[in-house]
């Protein structure tokens, strides 16, 4: 039974890590879009701005992943595994 639990835990952690990155990216999209609108950017200027704005920095990714790991109360190897996968998520 325990041999089945570990792979399921790992799959759940992987899914959660991708979900966190996706949610953070969606929030970033809203913020960048609002900034582009406020600056009245159009066409290529807007595309260029949005492209640069949407790139999540490693520090932002670390903060988001760390927050989720804390919320899930992950410790030890489970936390290390989660953080590793979360930080790799695109």
Image (tube, rainbow, N blue to C red):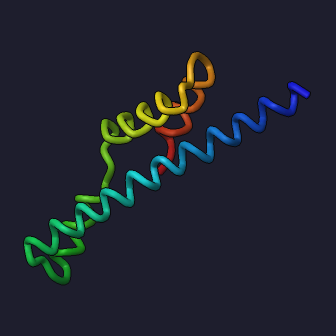
For this orientation, the residue located farthest to the left is 39
Indicate left or right for 38 with 50 as reference.
left
- Looking at the rendering, which quadrant does residue 65 occupy? top left
Quadrant location of the N terminus? top right
Count the marks.
0
Where on the picture, by quarter, is residue 49?
A: bottom left
Rendered view: 41 above or below 63:
below
Whether residue 45 sits left or right of residue 70 in the image: it is: left
Residue 48 point in image, percent of width and height: 21, 69
Name the residue furthest bottom: 43
Q: On the picture, is 69 further left or further right than 81?
A: left
Check the image and report above or below for 33 versus 44.
Answer: above
Going 50% across and 46% down the picture, which residue do you hit? 89
Q: Residue furthest right?
A: 1
Q: Residue at x 39, y 39 (%)?
A: 64
Residue 80 location in percent, x, y? Answer: 55, 24
How far from the left and from the top, in percent, is residue 76?
Answer: 58, 16
87 to the left or right of 16:
left
Q: Which residue is at the front of the view, 10 or 47?
A: 10
């Amino acid at each position: 039974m325990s041999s089945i639990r570990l792979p399921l835990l790992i799959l759940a952690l992987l899914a959660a890590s991708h979900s966190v990155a996706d949610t953070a990216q969606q929030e970033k999209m809203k913020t960048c879009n609002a900034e582009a609108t406020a600056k009245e950017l159009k066409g290529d200027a807007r595309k260029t701005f949005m492209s640069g704005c949407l790139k999540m920095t490693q520090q932002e990714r670390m903060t988001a992943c760390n927050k989720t790991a804390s919320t899930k109360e992950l410790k030890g190897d489970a936390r290390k595994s989660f953080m590793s996968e979360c930080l790799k998520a695109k």
